[in-house]
Image (cartoon, rainbow, N blue to C red):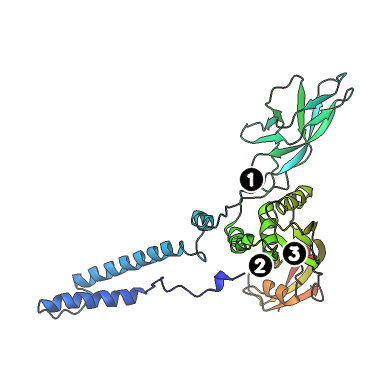
Amino acid sequence: MINIKALPTPTVLNTKTYEEILASNIDILKGVFSKRGIDWQPLDSDQYSLLTQAFSYRELYLRNEINEIVKQLLLAFCSGANLDHKVAENGIERLEGSNPYANYEFLLSSTLSVDYTIQAGIVLKDETTFYEAILLESITITAGTLKAIGLVELQEKISQSSVKTENITTSLPYVITAKSLEAFENGAETETDESLLNRYLISFADKSTAGAEETYKSLVLKSDRRVEDVKIIANTPGVVDIYYFSESADELMNTRILAYCNDKTERPLTDTVYAFEATPVEFSIDAVLKIYENQESGAIQIAAIKSLESGLKKIRKIGEIVTLSEINDFLKVEGVKEVVINSPLSNINVLENEIGICNAISITVAII
């Protein structure tokens, strides 16, 4: 897949400095005066010089504004709604995200002599009535018992939420109360520009009917917004093993992936497809940042930790090793003279179906 961020700056973006624009405008004004027999020279006290400077600044701002507009027409630079329009040319839409869900307890006011089924789709709201949730699957409270547990889905595209939608607004024949047993989790935010652009670039493989690796990657990334990375392994002819990673992976994700990689419309009939969650290889990082005295050690420490967390997330790929040099680079922020890594002592090597996951970070500062 092409790295569009490495492409050279397009020549259509005609950028000039203020000094270049001013010199050009002065030459134009000199030409106008020359035609009238006037030898005009710019002086700071001259009103024409002030006007020329003002118009030069205006031209500079207009050029920058036009360049920004043009950039939004180019794939490497466009973002937001402009990116949505660009990728739509290839039939790609931004993934809206997915709804988080949680287990709820449904309690009868008194026992019944017969089984009672609470139908899927009943609506629950929070005390403010702003948030809404629905029961995903029908549940049955058996005769002689008072309660049953069901899965409730919050109707918001968000990764998680602590809101409690315990007020049943759907009319029911019996008095039933709902109680939240846990926070809503395993949802996903609306797709980011970076993720959408990546899907667009590999989506051209969707047009292949030969079951290319990029085709399977594209299908998996479309199946569930929460999927963060995909690895396709086909060591046996006709057998495709899909390994995926997500911090919120669950059985629903696995089901969605297999459903998207179906043999009716997406993949070759001869392929046998399996989907597995990538095996995590956990490691911890313990390092010391050496800095000179009279520096803001607390600010440097916070910046280093943020840089490390961000960097580790970017290189968190299935089958990719995590090197000590990468950890060192992430921690060596401005103000750090030297990074001493106490743990790990060597690179984190992973198999092709594994992924390195940092589960603990301890960063201290030492004055030198």
- Separation (CA) of disc 1 from disc 2: 28 Å
Instruction: Determine the residue positioned at 55% across, 70% down.
Output: 5
Q: Which mark is residue 232?
A: 3
Instruction: Determine the residue positioned at 72% across, 31% down.
Output: 166
* Image-quadrant location for residue 219: bottom right
Q: Which residue is mark 1?
A: 157
Q: Which mark is residue 307?
A: 2
**Label 2 secondary element:** helix
Camera sees residue 309: no
The answer to whether the residue labelled 2 contacts the one labelled 3, judged by CB atoms less than 8 Å apart, is no
- Mark 3 neighbour density, 10 Å: few (under 14) some (14–19) many (20 or more): many
The answer to whether the residue labelled 1 contacts the one labelled 3, judged by CB atoms less than 8 Å apart, is no
**Label 1 secondary element:** loop
Name the N-terminal-most of marks 1 and 2. Answer: 1
Q: Amino acid at mark 3?
A: Ile
- Separation (CA) of disc 1 from disc 3: 28 Å
Q: Quadrant of the C terminus?
A: bottom right
Q: Is residue 56 left or right of residue 309?
A: left
Q: Amino acid at mark 2?
A: Ser
Name the N-terminal-most of marks 2 and 3. Answer: 3
